[in-house]
Image (tube, grey):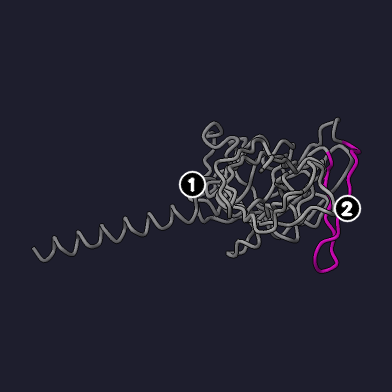
Amino acid sequence: MRYLFIISLFLMNSFWLKSQSEEEYNGYRIYLSDPKVISSKKKAFKIKFRLTNTGSKSLEKGNKSEYENQLIVKLDEELQNTSVAQYTDLIRQQLEDGKYQLNSGQSELTELKIKIPKERRGQEVFTVNTKGGSSMGFNRKLCPDLVLDSLGLVKKDKKYVYIEFKVKNIGKGAINIIGDKKEEADNILMGAYFSGSPRFSRGAIPADHMYLTGLEETKGILFPGQVIEGKMKISRKKQTKYNKVLIIYVDSNQIVIECNETNNRDHLLVK
């Protein structure tokens, strides 16, 4: 009887550890670090880096259909600051080809040769300065683009306005909606403003704000075509009889680089 108790306890503990692991690492995720660009030409480039499987599931040779379009590729800061960052999608495609065997938690040095499609050779690239004096290159045709896909008034009273919304990425590039830090202040900000007209201007009065949350399955990344939903409670304390238009602004602190920075807003009439 004593041995049965010990075995049961062991099995329960193993199940708990497994559950914790699956909760921490969900799905297929690869982390690229220690980059070294071996050669770079107009048609192709060779790059060597450390490939680490930080997901809960293993990559298996010949198993492309299992994780195609589900593989999350993370770049370390050093790799993000190189021109290679604009070809992350091409690197992901190679890793999705089913030629690699990499168990969960496993790490190995890998060399890839990336062929650049004709239509992407010599494309316009713009540079953005980042923290620490470094810079990052972005391809304009692969940039993300956040829009309010829908905006609805749920209810209102004398003190608050309650809305629900959907934010969609209509661009061709993925975007980090949820930051790396545990604090919500690292996430994308949604701002609410009262105005006399639907047009956003300096005269718009800040009413409230919230940080987007969720996207646990993709570790905070909103891929092209995907939607994140939410609800917002907005104070009417600063609303006047002249400001009956409620403007909702996605990424109102403008920390994200997008294809179009002018389509992040929508409005409702609140009388």
| Residue 59 image offset from top left, x and y in percent | 53, 43
Q: Relative to the observer, which residue lies in front, 265 or 18? A: 265
At label 1, counting other C-alpha atoms closer than 10 Å, the crowd grade (few under 14, some 14-19, many 20 or more) is some
Asked if the stretch drawn in magenta spans residue 102, the answer is no
Q: Residue at x 82, y 41 (%)?
A: 260
Residue behind mark 2: 127
Q: Is residue 240 left or right of residue 99?
A: right
**Residue type of the residue flagged with mark 2:** Thr
Q: Is residue 209 left or right of residue 133?
A: left
Which image quadrant: the C terminus? top right
Secondary structure beneath dot 2 equals strand
Q: Which mark is residue 57?
A: 1
**Residue type of the residue flagged with mark 1:** Lys
| Residue 67 image offset from top left, x and y in percent | 55, 37
Relative to 112, residue 118 above or below? above
Secondary structure beneath dot 1 equals loop
Q: Nearer the viewer, mark 1 or mark 2?
A: 2
Q: Would residue 94 be visible to someone looking at this image? A: no
Relative to 219, residue 180 above or below? below
Q: Which residues are magenta?
A: 121-140
Tell me which numbered mark, 1 or 2, is placed earlier along the sequence: 1
